Amino acid sequence: MSRTTNNRVQSRLLRVFLLQLILISVVTIIGVITASLIVERLLVNKALQGEADYYWNKHAESEEFPLPETLNLTSFLSSDTTRPVPVLFKNLPLGQHRVDQNQQRQIVHVSERDGDRLYLLFAGGTVSKLAFYFGVLPLLLVLLTMYGFAFLTYQLSKQVVSPITRLASVIERFDFNKREANELNLASLDQSSNSETEILAAALNHFVQRSSASIERERNFTRFASHELRTPLAVIQGSASSLELLELEGAPARAVQRIKRTSRQMGDLLNTLLLLAREESEADTENCELLSVNDLTDTLLAQLSKVYSNKGNRIRIQHHERLFAKAPESVLSIVLGNVLGNAFSYTQDGDIQVSIDSTKITITDTGTGMDQNSIDQAFEPFFRANNDSDSHQHQGLGLAIVKQSCRNYGWDISLDSEKGVGTSVTITFAA
């Protein structure tokens, strides 16, 4: 993983370095070609033109003036019978030309005056040497110098980003899902000469310390809440069950039922809060047995029907096929109980339909429903959307824990609702 991180940064630097080299090489090649053209077409052409003009002027003064002859320059005159013009050059038009003679390149300058033609032959190899010494060689030295500076820049850039890549490597290698954040060791980076890296490492260490302290506080709260709140709830529920044995009637009986219902709701809320406080991203299903969604749904429907008996709702359940889920019963009860509880809570004298097949369960009600804005936020913790049609309010805490539980166990939940028409929730279980 760290090697991948280093490669990402260093490969970018290398690409920039290579791009610089390519651009420098292209510019150098263009410069060499330009230098050769300048030497041949400008300097040599000017020199040969000057030689020709000088000869014609002297020839006008004296026909006995000798033709120019040097180490690299050979001359022919069309009127000179003692030294005839080679056939290869005789038909060349006026101007400068490149001609291959005996596997050697010659630069031929042809000029004419008073019907007589002068042929000046300049050795092409000399032009190449001139282009090399005055064009290629200086550009080559410049190129090597620029290559050296570019490589030095690349090495310095690597040294600058090296502490950052090491920091990224340490963080990338660290598995936050399996290890505690306070185990992240950035001490080796604190001694880096890169001040920005020191600041970043110190900030990360401070963040890790604060995160670890926050996580520890949450764990302590979870442990204390689980112990301190469950005990009084159990006492309240036990006392309410004892009061039921007295066969009370009227207002006392209704008060006992309210106590039982409220204590049960508090217990569900406590379970919801504790589950939300957990950090588990994936649930462990290895030690879980297959649970019958059909049987658990029947049980929950029977309980909720008694609790909301005053609603006058009509309940219908269709068991098309048997559906099983691999999860703890408490988790499955919270998921199904919250969805079914919402259907009962927000439906008055309506229909609640439950359909179960081999892969999913669908719960549909004809209750108050939700608008699109409420649907988009329904799975957010503690979201509440006022319903203008009655005094009820949709509370998103239950749906938040349902969403988290489904995500942990690989289930899929979808919600479809229309305000004033009703709501339909579908939970698709993993195979």
Image (tube, helix red, strand yellow):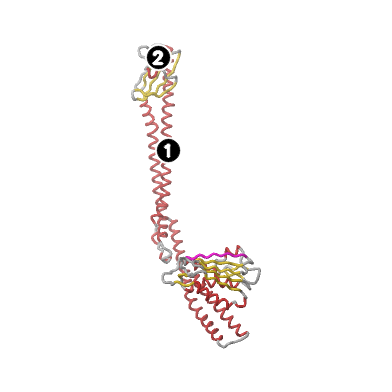
Does dot 1 land on a helix, a strand or a loop? helix
In the image, taking residue 84 as reference, residue 330 lies left or right, namely right
Q: Amino acid at mark 2?
A: Ser
Occupied quadrant, residue 58:
top left
What secondary structure characterizes most of the magenta part? strand
* Place of residue 147 in the rendered image (x, y in percent of width and height, measured from the top left): 39, 42
* Place of residue 294 in the rendered image (x, y in percent of width and height, measured from the top left): 50, 72
* Residues packed near mark 2 inside 10 Å, few (<14), some (14 to 19) or many (20 plus): some
Mark found first going from the N terminus, 1 or 2? 1
Q: Is residue 356 above or below residue 16?
A: below
In the image, taking residue 399 as reference, residue 169 lies left or right, namely left
Return the residue nearer the eye: 308 or 163. Answer: 308
Name the residue: 40% across, 60% down: 173
Q: Quadrant of the N terminus?
A: bottom left
Tell me where the magenta segment starts and ends, as one range. 410-418
Q: Which residue is mark 2?
A: 78
* Place of residue 35 in the rendered image (x, y in percent of width and height, measured from the top left): 42, 31
* Residues packed near mark 1 inside 10 Å, few (<14), some (14 to 19) or many (20 plus): few
Name the residue: 41% across, 71% down: 287
Q: Does the rendering let one see residue 210?
A: no
In the image, taking residue 250 as reference, residue 134 lies left or right, namely left
Q: Which residue is mark 1?
A: 26
Name the residue: 40% across, 41% down: 146
Q: Is residue 107 above or below residue 248?
A: above
- Extreme right residue here? 389
- Extreme front residue here? 320
